[in-house]
Image (spheres, grey):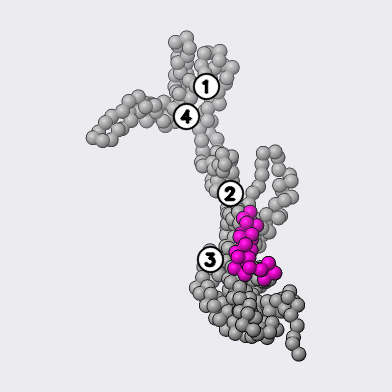
Amino acid sequence: MRADEAMRGVNDNWSEQVKSLHLAIDQQRARALGVTSEHVATASQTILSGLPIGQYRENNDQIPIMLRQPQQERDTMTALTNTYLPTENGQSIPLAQIARPQLLWEYGVVWRQNRQFAITVQGDVADGIQAATVALRIDAKLNELRAKLDAGYHIDIAGTVAESQKGTSSISANVPLMLFIIFTLLMLQLRSFPRALLVFLTGPLGVIGAALMLLIVGKPMGFVAMLGIIALNGMIIRNSVILIDQIEQDIASGTDRWTAIIEAAVRRCRPIILTAAAAVLAMIPLIDSTFWGPMAVAIMGGLIVATALTLLSLPAMYALFFRVKKVV
């Protein structure tokens, strides 16, 4: 991560190591003298931290009564080794006969994730670059390191990128059901499979504008942007339904099909453009938002491009689907 030019202040969450007092127990000698590791642990806790032997009540507060050695007898390692331990035969022996105290370095805080030891390495990203771009770039370079890890060790990507991937996966799982419901509603509204299919095909036109706008502005195509594209799909289909319905009304009133297609596109051009412009202008305050910015940009770009493409392509596709020819 430090090797990446876009990273700043790379660090991990295990911080600095601290000194810790350990007792190296000679298990053979301890067993010979009738002392177990539990005895040593209890005696050490009594000396240093203390053991609760009762409680003192003061009004509504309960204060534990702790039994431990005086301050001068637990300040030094020498005092600890001179402590006597009870044995199973009723005698007492000095702790120094079976254990040797030593100072070691260890981490003061040990972090776990999913009940496994975990080290989180993180850092800041330089201005002008999306965090998702840098994270995915570093994650691709870690594949070589992953292949060399011992069994039980793994490197996972976390943070906003991982959460975005989870959200995208949950959306993708329900996309088929969403598309089925949309097409069913179009069938009920238009009462024609070709017309419903024609309107349904205009929905993906917004992806073109959304992708272009995200590239121009420099916003990531993440979970929030996907939400914007899904919402955009409904807006585009609504405009297509309005245009198709106007064509059908003109044909029903006696206008020939070629003229009905042209006049419907002309008459519905201004209402469709105005509704699209209102939605685009409403997204402007959200552009600078860190969280909602990608969604606003996706909706704005998609609506602008899809509205123009719908007004141009939908009449042409209608004429192609139903083989409408110009009346001479």
Rendered residue at 55%/35% (across/down): 104
The residue identified by callout 2 is 120
Q: Residues within 10 Å of mark 4 (few under 14, many from 20)?
A: some
Question: Is residue 292 toward the left or the right of residue 312 in the image?
Answer: left
- Mark 4 lies on a secondary structure that is helix
Q: Residue type at mark 3: give it.
A: Trp
Say whether residue 324 is visible: yes
**Residue 6 position by quadrant:** bottom right
Report if residue 190 lies within the magenta region.
yes
Magenta segment? 173-195
Rendered residue at 55%/23% (across/down): 25
Residues at marks 1 and 2, CA–CA distance in whole angstroms = 34 Å
Q: Residue type at mark 4: give it.
A: Met
Q: Residue type at mark 1: give it.
A: Ser
Residue 74: horizontal and vertical position, in percent?
A: 41, 29
- Mark 1 lies on a secondary structure that is helix
The residue identified by callout 4 is 77
Report if residue 298 lies within the magenta region.
no
**Residue 165 position by quadrant:** bottom right
Rendered residue at 33%/30% (across/down): 64
